[in-house]
Image (tube, grey):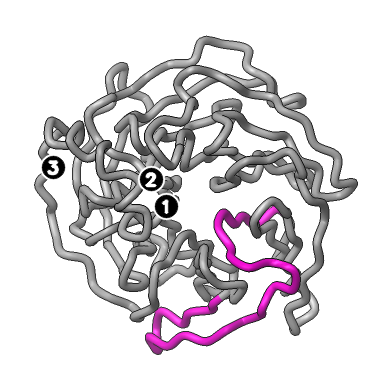
């Protein structure tokens, strides 16, 4: 989850290595839902509304994918920019704002935000995954590690660190997108063009298996789980959304849509759009229809 154009000057030496990345041909061109600048991450509420963050703004945007309109749902007090977001309780979201983890609560109708805790020693918090209804996992791209963070108490600790998460380049930036499901953490390392997984303890979130590399030739930003059991990865400067079969021994990414500067994704939650992946990107939010 990183907007590459804004970091191009610092990252320019890294792009020479991207020329050997895998060629991905898209199945379709995504349909633009709304135009917004530099969308970093997205989530979908149970009512079908899409939430979107921007690393340069404290505004959390809400998008109506039917009416194709957007507005500011809430400005998160204390944050200068927002990145990772995840729903850990019905209509209650954890959102990264700088080094702080914020609670944004829509459950009473009017959204309210509050700081849960600041991770003072963090370097560059970016990706966020819901672990359970009281815990999230937070990726520190600058340190190459993952925090287990209690949204109830604010307690946190590093639970995952590995060479596959390590930062590189002039920024520097390492582990980017992160998601958790059924005992496995899936994550990308954006400037190493790599995608990985590790089995973790379902209570402590500490690794209980080997860190496995799935590919090293395609840029990956953030990711999401589809209703068909597949994983979808936004490829940022590779301008696509790719589909991955997590059951395959060597997952081969297959493009399902062309989205310029794709950063993140989340699936619709109504009967009408459960097969639609909403994709955050540099120019707004887009919709990609997939087979389920």
Residue 84 spot, x, y in % from top left: 57, 54
Q: Is residue 77 left or right of residue 19?
A: right
Q: Which mark is on residue 24?
A: 3
Q: Are marks 3 and 2 in contact (CB under 8 Å)?
A: no
> Which secondary structure, mark 3?
loop
Against 155, residue 80 (above or below) is below
Against 54, residue 249 (above or below) is above
Residue at image mark 2? 221
In this view, the mark in front (1 or 3)? 1
- How far apart marks 1 and 3 lie (CA) works out to 20 Å
Residue 45 spot, x, y in % from top left: 58, 68
Numbered range of the magenta stretch: 61-88
Q: Specify which label sits upstream in the sequence, 1 or 3.
A: 1
Residue 115 spot, x, y in % from top left: 80, 61
Residue at image mark 1? 2
Crowd class of label 1 (few under 14; some 14 to 19; many from 20; radius 10 Å): many
> Which secondary structure, mark 2?
loop
| Residue 191 part of the magenta-drawn span | no
> Which secondary structure, mark 1?
loop
Q: Are marks 2 and 1 in contact (CB under 8 Å)?
A: yes
Q: Which mark is on residue 78?
A: none
Q: Is residue 233 left or right of residue 26?
A: right
Q: Name the residue: 80% across, 36% down.
A: 156
Q: Name the residue: 78% across, 76% down.
A: 112
Q: Name the residue: 63% across, 68% down.
A: 80
- How far apart marks 2 and 1 lie (CA) works out to 7 Å
| Residue 68 part of the magenta-drawn span | yes
């Amino acid at each position: 989850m990183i907007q590459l154009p804004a970091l191009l000057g610092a990252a320019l030496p890294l792009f020479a290595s991207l020329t050997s990345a895998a060629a991905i041909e898209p199945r379709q061109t995504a349909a633009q839902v709304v135009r917004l600048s530099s969308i970093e991450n997205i989530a979908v509420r149970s009512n079908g509304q899409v939430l979107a963050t921007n690393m340069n703004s404290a505004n959390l945007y809400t998008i109506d994918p039917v009416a194709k309109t957007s507005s500011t749902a809430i400005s998160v007090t204390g944050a200068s920019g927002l990145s990772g977001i995840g729903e850990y309780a019905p209509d209650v979201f954890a959102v990264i704002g700088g080094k702080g983890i914020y609670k944004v609560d829509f459950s009473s109708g009017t959204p309210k935000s509050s700081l849960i805790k600041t991770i003072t020693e963090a370097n560059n918090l970016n990706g966020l995954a819901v672990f359970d209804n009281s815990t999230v996992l937070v990726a520190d791209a600058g340190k190459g590690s993952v925090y287990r963070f209690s949204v109830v108490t604010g307690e946190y600790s590093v639970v995952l660190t590995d060479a596959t998460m390590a930062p590189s380049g002039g920024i520097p930036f390492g582990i980017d997108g992160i998601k958790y499901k059924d005992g496995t953490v899936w994550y990308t390392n954006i400037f190493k063009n790599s995608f990985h997984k590790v089995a973790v303890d379902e209570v402590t979130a500490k690794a209980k298996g080997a860190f496995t590399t799935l590919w090293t030739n395609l840029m990956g930003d953030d990711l999401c789980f589809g209703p068909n059991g597949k994983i979808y990865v936004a490829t940022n400067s590779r301008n696509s959304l790719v589909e991955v079969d997590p059951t395959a021994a060597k997952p081969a990414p297959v493009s399902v849509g062309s989205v310029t500067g794709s950063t993140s994704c989340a699936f619709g939650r109504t009967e009408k759009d459960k097969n639609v992946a909403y994709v955050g990107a540099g120019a707004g939010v887009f919709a990609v229809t997939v087979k389920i």
